Image (cartoon, grey):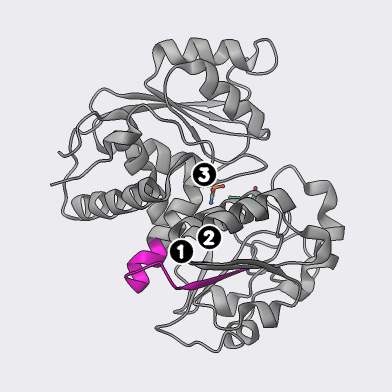
Amino acid sequence: MLKCNPGLYGRSLLRLADLSDEEMMDVLDLAITLKARRCAGVRGDLLKRRQIALIFEKSSTRTRTAASVAIRDEGGAAEYLSKSDIHLGAKESVKDTARVLGRTFDGILYRGFAQKTVETLAEYAGVPVWNGLTDVFHPTQILADLMTIKEVFGRLKGLKLAYVGDGRNNVANSLMIGCAKAGLDYVNCTPPELCPDTALVAEAREIACRNGASVSVVHDPVAGVTGANVVYTDVWVSMGEEAQKETRLKLLRPYQVNMELMRATGNAQGELIFLHCLPAFHDHETVVSSESGAMEVTDEVFESPLSKVFDEAENRMHTIKALYVSALTELSAL
Ligand code: CP
Ligand code: NVA
């Protein structure tokens, strides 16, 4: 039997803090059940005839395909709308676009720049809106990350996750909140210039405190990863920040995740994994414009048995499906 969280019916996800800690854990459990269901060959009709609009102002491989397949798997359909396909923010306001799409679709997933845009969509659409990445948050990514950690270790509480790299980007921000909610100790290893917003750190600390966990920001990557069970990194230059590439390369070179840093955790296979939301600059093929091979992670780590990045990528689909089912299905169990 699939247990849904009836409390999430009709609800949007704009940032992880929109969910209670328990609701977030329920979404992860539902995603794990939905994954098993798909692996057993079931393509059901939990989302039969549901229609989702996918608005993408930035490019995407995982989020777009996960969001499309998740709805189709269960009998619904998705309409992909790139920035150039619709009038959003040009000939038509976000508010008007929200009111139009909300009359036609059962839900909207948005990827773009401003957090304000996804908030306005949610305010006026009258249907659930999911944040598929903004400059500030990437909540659906972190659900997949936590699901992957839970699959590997069988638990979340009490583990330690070290994020190494650009400490104030969308992934780092949502990861900090997600770890705090799930009871993982979170260490953000980043240069002083790229520290997360202090108000967000304070919010995460409050959440962590009620779950017996901690949130810290450090500048020494070796000290930061000591004792870590999960080492996580992301690109050094996020979408929309290309002009800062040279500065970022200089700042973040000492924060590259390589085998020496993985060893500095003091943990080995069985107690340690590597995660990356992807896409990753880890080899010469993808780093065509860089002067010296890998950027945020070396090939040695990326291709090692410690790396769970493709399980993590797959889990994007199961977690987004869990969000759809929770928000669009009224039943508490199916
Ligand atoms: N991790 C992630 O969001 O990947 P995409 O940019 O390919 O969607
Ligand atoms: N921080 C990255 C995440 C990509 C999934 C970016 O915003 O480009």
Q: Residue at x 48, y 58 (%)?
A: 210
Residue 151 lies in the magenta stretch = yes
The image shows residue 138 at horizontal and vertical percentages of 56, 46
Quick check: 46 above or below 90?
Answer: below
Badges 1 and 3: C-beta atoms under 8 Å apart?
A: no
- In this picture, which residue range is highlighted in magenta? 148-163
Q: Is residue 164 left or right of residue 64?
A: right
Q: Quadrant of residue 255?
A: bottom right
Task: Looking at the image, tell me whether mark 2 or mark 1 is earlier in sequence order.
Answer: 1
The image shows residue 88 at horizontal and vertical percentages of 63, 18
Badges 2 and 1: C-beta atoms under 8 Å apart?
A: yes
Amino acid residing under circle 3: Ala
Q: Kindly identify which residue carries mark 3.
A: 17
Task: Looking at the image, tell me whether mark 1 or mark 3 is earlier in sequence order.
Answer: 3
Q: Using the numbered discs, state the Cα–Cα distance from disc 2 to disc 1 in whole angstroms.
A: 6 Å
Q: Kindly identify which residue carries mark 2.
A: 208
Q: Quick one: SS at disc 3?
A: helix
Q: Kindly identify which residue carries mark 1.
A: 183
